[in-house]
Image (cartoon, rainbow, N blue to C red):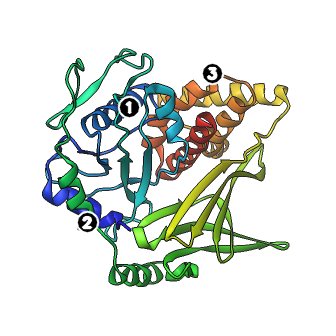
Amino acid sequence: MINKRLLIKNLLAHNDENSFYDKKRKIDIGFKEGKAKFLKHVCALSNSNPKNNSYIVIGVEDEDNKIIGVDFFDDSKIQNLINAYLTNPPIVQYENISFPHLPDNKVVGLVTIRPNDKITSLRKNIWKYYGGSVFFRDGSMSMPKVFDIEIKDVNSKIVAAIETHAQNNIEHTLNGVFDFMQTRKDYEPQYKVFKEYFVICWAGQKKQVKHETFFSRVDIELINEQVRLFYSALDEVSIYYDDNTFKIVEYVKLGLQDSFKYYPLEETLISFFENVNYSIDTELIFEPPQFDRKILHHIFNANNALLEKLQKGLSLTKREIIDLENLPATYLICYLNGFETAIDKLTEIKPLLKAHNSDVYQLYKQTIRILRKVKYS
């Protein structure tokens, strides 16, 4: 089993960007330009490596390889995006890898692109790229090219050596468990061994509601691979496990006019097998809350007026400052109830909230995370 933290270190230490490896400071697939560039790189790496894995490391400075990290990204439906826009789409996996020196809310993103031995191309137009375009890696660049020659396999031995040097061992696993228990000691850290091999550690702030136990500030890691399976500073989570499975059910808090409720958003089931293998299955179980349209019209117009004041740099009243915290979530509710232009408003408020207050901006990012999951599904 590959220790993904070691794999990233090996990629950064021994290779410049090349035909099987790329690095990015960040990606943003919430907007057309970022989505198009990500698809271009996936397409190019897949075409340039017909026989071996390709990788994109996200959260690294380009010039000096400094690991700065990115926000936790847990969209299991990213394959849907790949399938929608690429012909002969490769299997793509996005994982969040913990590094000890990073803040709790930061990880390094690792995109693994599996070989499919076929020519991958854009299925349809996106941003400035045309449907039918075929991309290849040219050194560190992903470039459009006319495909008229057979692709040579020149990377398999190199990639195999890098992956071999990133294999996990008992020392790495034990160190990972001890590090997690020490780092998360304020939130009752726990661990469980599955099939005498896999180790999952988790921690969170426990809350008892009737007969149900929920956790907030949750961190869950598969120690063997140094993969963070779940992280959230805000949402409520329930955790269930037996000898073969570990299940996470995530809830989101939504509501209007100071009346809020927790709604189940997503269920993740990790199954462990006797052949030293595991699978992760994620299902969106979210049922968007429906509200009276007259009330929503009033809230939508009030949100727009508040947005306009922010754009003009006007001072806000105490009530408007409170409403500002709920602005992303109420725009989301409007969108889920048929107000299509609310999604444009969410785009407009991003730089304003980022400049206004870090706590409000964190709430915005959580809202966008929910929206992304719903849209991709």
Give amino acid for label 1. Answer: Leu
Q: Name the quarter where the N terminus is drawn.
A: bottom left
Please give the residue where the numbered disc 3 appears in the rendered image.
Answer: 341
| Circle 2 crowding by C-alpha within 10 Å: few under 14, some 14–19, many from 20 | some
Q: Which mark is residue 87?
A: none
Task: Look at label 3 and name its amino acid.
Answer: Thr
Q: Please tell me whether residue 172 is drawn above or below residue 64 in the rendered image.
A: below
Labelled pair 2, 3 in contact (Cβ < 8 Å): no
Q: What kind of residue is marked 2?
A: Thr
Given contact means CB atoms under 8 Å apart, are the residues at marks 1 and 2 in contact? no
Q: Position of residue 203 (x, y in %)?
A: 56, 75
For the residue labelled by badge 1, is the local secondary structure a helix, a strand or a loop? Answer: helix
Quadrant in which the C terminus appears: top right
Q: Which picture quadrant has residue 171?
A: bottom left
Real-space CA distance between mark 1 and mark 2, rounded to the nearest whole angstrom: 28 Å
Residue nearest the viewer, comparing 303 with 204: 204
Closer to the eye: label 1 or 3? 1
Measuring from the top left, give residue 116's x and y in whole percent: 38, 39
Judging by the rendered image, the residue that carries numbered circle 1 is 39
Cα–Cα span, label 1 and label 3: 26 Å
Residue drawn where x is 37% and y is 48% of the image: 111
Q: Residues within 10 Å of mark 1 (few under 14, many from 20)?
A: many
Looking at the image, residue 214 lies above or below residue 21: below
Secondary structure category for the residue under label 3? loop
In percent of width and height, residue 356 lies at 47, 43
Q: Which residue is mark 2?
A: 164
Question: Relative to residue 260, is residue 161 depicted above or below?
Answer: below
Residue at the image position 43 percent from the left and 64 percent from the top: 227
